[in-house]
Image: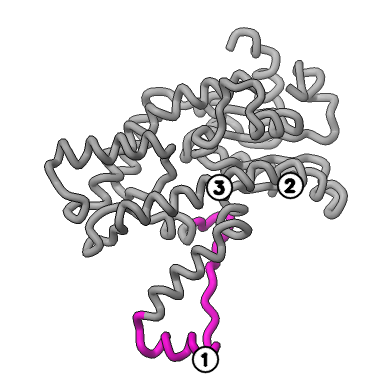
Amino acid sequence: MIYNSARDWQADSARKILLFGMSGLGKTYLSNMLRDDAGWFHYSIDYRIGTRYMGEYIADNFKREAMKVPLLRELLLTDSVYIASNITFENLAPLSTYLGKPGNPELGGVPFAEYCARQAQHREAETAALLDTGRFIKRAQELYGYSNFVCDSGGSICEVVDPNDPNDPIMSALSRNLLLVWIKGSDAHRDALIRRFDRAPKPMYYQPEFLKQVWGDYLTEQDVTEAQVNPDAFLRYGYARLLDHRRPRYAAMAKWGVTITADEVAAVKSPDDFNTLIATALDRKPAD
């Protein structure tokens, strides 16, 4: 780790961290606070994915739908309109919309093969965005004059790394440059996330073998064909399993850094509170 004690952390005038954990536990809350209240550089992995690496896929999907409308088709073919994604740190909907949901097209689903192809695009994009982190640390310092840096990772980071491999290229590159911080949720947080997801299912990234297993189980248990699958019902079915699949992967990643809890994050009201929390996490590291 780049910090081995609270003293190391507190003495550093150019702090660098990466926050990871399930979406909804406070990564973006902390990142926004550090950016807005303490002047940290905020590097969002999902924003980087949706702009640099998947922006063309997303825009082409919009255009594909627009080409189905005669008026828009004519305007597009004559370069009379411009269609692009307006993705922001606060609104990543264009990325999740492109990932889509597998199942019945009449219910907004996409064929499973196409869904898997988009998942593979996301995996490649997330890998590249994570490996860009070191360059952005340097860029933030040299180009914009930022000393402190926070990387707001996506919930699927644990799906594109092998934290049990000491030579994993992504984990090695990240740990050389930042302190990895796991925001750990409790069983109560898990249940709350499931309830929230049930109200508004959203597209997710799945590790390929896990996705195939969950998809096959759903088809068998529901006794349906691919074309009969309700996309939202499938996402609800897989979400709790996805949380349980990711938890040990996050825990393995945490061995490369430190752990804080979602309850501790909820108590953070200022950058000073956050700095104190990280110092505490570093000092209790041997007990993790």
Looking at the figure, which quarter contains the C terminus? top right
- For disc 2, the marked residue is 41
Q: Earlier in the sequence, mark 2 or mark 3?
A: 2
- For disc 3, the marked residue is 124
Q: Which amino acid type corresponds to the residue marked 1 in the rendered image? A: Thr
221 above or below 89? above
Going 75% across and 41% down the picture, which residue do you hit?
134
**x and y, in percent, of residue 165 in the image:** 60, 22
Element on which disc 3 rests: helix
Q: Nearer the viewer, residue 8 or 268?
A: 8
Residue furthest left as drawn: 223
Packing grade of label 2 (10 A; few <14, some 14-19, many >=20) is: many
Residue 42 relative to residue 139: left or right: left
Mark 2 vs 3: CB contact within 8 A = no
Q: Which residues are magenta?
A: 68-92
Element on which disc 2 rests: strand
Q: Nearer the viewer, residue 9 or 77?
A: 77
Mark 1 vs 3: CB contact within 8 A = no
Mark 2 or mark 3, which is nearer to you? 3
- For disc 1, the marked residue is 78
Q: Report if residue 119 lies within the magenta region.
A: no
Going 33% across and 39% down the picture, which residue do you hit?
212
Count of marks overlaid on the render: 3
Residue furthest top as drawn: 287
Element on which disc 1 rests: loop
Going 30% across and 57% down the picture, which residue do you hit?
111
Q: Which amino acid type corresponds to the residue marked 3 in the rendered image? A: Glu
Mark 1 or mark 2, which is nearer to you? 1
Q: Earlier in the sequence, mark 1 or mark 2?
A: 2
Gap in Å between the C-alphas at discs 2 and 3?
24 Å
Residue 65 relative to residue 122: left or right: left
Packing grade of label 1 (10 A; few <14, some 14-19, many >=20) is: few
